[in-house]
Image (cartoon, helix red, strand yellow):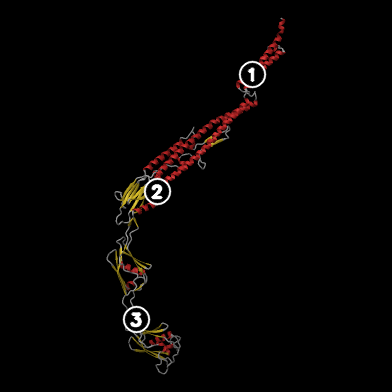
Amino acid sequence: MASNITLSAGVRQNLLSLQSTAAMMSQTQSRLSTGKKVNSALDNPVNFFTSSSLQSRATDLSSLIDSMSNGIKQLQAADNGITSITSTVQSMQSTLRQARQDKSFKTASYSLELPATPAGTEQLSFSGGAIGTTAVNVDLTSGAATAATYTAGTFAAMDFSASSPTAGTNSFAFAANTTAFGATDEVDITLNVDGGGPVTVTLTQGIVQGVGNNDSTIDDIDEFTDALNAAIGASSLTGDVTATNDGTNVTLTSATTGTSSTVAITAVDGDPDAGNADFGATPFGAAVGAGTAGAAAGAAKTLSFDVAVDGGTATTVTIDAAAVAAVGDNDNVIDDVAELASIVDTQLGTGVTVDGTGTTLALESATTGTTSSIAISNLTATNITNTSGVANTATPVTGAALEAKTVDELVTEINNNTAFKDKIVASSDNGKLRIQNLSTADLTVGGLNTTGTAVTGSTGTNTIGGNDVRKTLVTQFNTLLDQLNKTADDSSFNGINLLRADKLKLVFNEIGTSTLEIQAKDVSGNATSIDAAYLGITTATNEDFGSDATLDSLNETMTTALSTLRAQASSFGSNLSIVQNRQDFTKSMINTLQTGADNLVLADTNEEGANLLALQTRQQLSTTALSLSSQADQAVLRLF
């Protein structure tokens, strides 16, 4: 029943002071024990809740630190993988360079032993090695066996017509005379044809009026000729003689031919009745004379020559008028070389080809080689002056044989053949043909003798082994390739393998709005694994290492692969730097948040210690004061 106890004002005041001091000491002791000046919302609501918020964010960020640390390890694992793959690719490139420098290719040498008279079908063949299954052949002979070909001189036309018998003639110059024939005028011309006696041919007014322009005047040589023929027709000489002219001269021609054919003018009388001298003794130029007797037929024309083919019995070719008339335009003249060739071809028959083109006659044997020959002899021309289209051959024309190629010729041909480029190399080995197999596969050489030691064009073969050093390096290359892919498979950390196109997502803030996705990608931005296929490296074959050109190409692939790996390593390195920076940033942010939160709630222990000491002193003073106040109240006890 403390309420029924009455305390003096002094005691009560001192008691309240002690109670207040005790409460303050309790609060100070609490701050010293917790280190905080705000332990609940009651202490300072604003600072308490602000500090709690900052602490919560710091806690959330702390949980992300582990994820970032994990991501850093995953990036480092990928970087370790790329570093190892890079070393592997460099080793593969070193293997390629070693193979490129190795020239321990195998060779074989063969003597050249072709037959003395090769058939022209002999070949040297190569298959296998870098050439492939389809054999590539090289002819062992050059050129081709040729046939003997005789070529005549430039052709000129040849006339084989026999000269015909000719008629007797008598010609005289025509003299114009425009005197008109009177009714009684006439001109008598006495002729003796073929020695048959004199016959008088008379020109009268009636005959003259019947020719030309039908007047009484002979105006020109044509009217005179026509009038003369009319007068002949009116005489007993009709059909025995004919008058013609060439515009200047008049010619009388007998109807017969031969040496007895004659036309003689024995007399010309321009005034036979002696009463008219208008025409004179030789009118129109007619002159007395025996004329020219006819001629008998000429001798026949022939051309003959002997043709011996391949040293055989000669065949005589005879060309006469009958043979000429049977070809071409069927006259007696060989007008062109084609007609001459046709005649010769018909008479020679088989075994020789006759050609007549242009202006040259050519004869070609049906056989080839050095035994092929054509000889033209005994050329005889009768009454033929032009024989330029045919000529004797002092020495028979012979054909040519095949030529066997020399070792040097084969070396040049093989090395210049694009089918053999970087596959085989030929050279001369003391007169032998040496073949070097630029491959790791066996090379088969065909066209050899049965022992495979000499080039004969026969069916024998020989094998030149491949490069064993390069074969070994192929195995080494493929082993490294296998390790490359296995390294990529083993570059994982905690279930994530960035070299196998896995995606790593890292969160950098507590609300998930700041993230980073990391994944291996190609130049097009597509996700990709970092392996041999991505780097363009494939399994090597013996054939790949057999060719220097292929090795150079593979070496370029390695160089490109290294560039790709460095680019990917740079990308991962950049991402690693980002994550490490964010990790450091997050750690700093956590420290900042925690420091800020502590600043709001932590107590100053020095201050609180001083406060406690002061409160203890105050408590002692208050206790003393309370004791003094209580002693005042005890004064009444002295009365007892």
Mark 1 packing: few (<14 Cα in 10 Å), some, or many (20+)? Answer: many
Q: Is residue 39 visible?
A: no
Q: Of label 1 and label 3, which has the lower sequence position?
A: 3
Residue beneath the point at 64% across and 20% down: 610
Amino acid type at mark 1: Leu
Residue lying furthest top? 640
Specify whether 205 is left or right of 196: right
Find out whether the residues at labels 2 and 1 contact each other: C-beta distance under 8 Å. Answer: no
Q: Quadrant of the C terminus?
A: top right
Residue lying furthest left? 313
Amino acid type at mark 2: Asp
Who is closer to the viewer here, 161 or 632? 632
Which residue matches tag 1?
612
Which residue matches tag 2?
422
Q: How many marks?
A: 3
Percent position (x, y) of residue 271? 41, 92
Mark 1: which secondary structure?
Answer: helix
Mark 3 packing: few (<14 Cα in 10 Å), some, or many (20+)? Answer: some
Who is closer to the viewer here, 97 or 232? 97
The answer to whether 580 is drawn above or below residue 208 in the figure is above
Mark 3: which secondary structure?
Answer: loop
Percent position (x, y) of residue 102? 39, 44
Specify whether 404 is left or right of 96: left
Percent position (x, y) of residue 318? 30, 71
Specify whether 154 is left or right of 179: left
Find out whether the residues at labels 1 and 3 contact each other: C-beta distance under 8 Å. Answer: no
What is the C-alpha distance between the residues marked 2 and 1? 100 Å
Res 246 → quadrant = bottom left
Specify whether 49 is left or right of 217: right
Q: Of label 2 and label 1, which has the lower sequence position?
A: 2
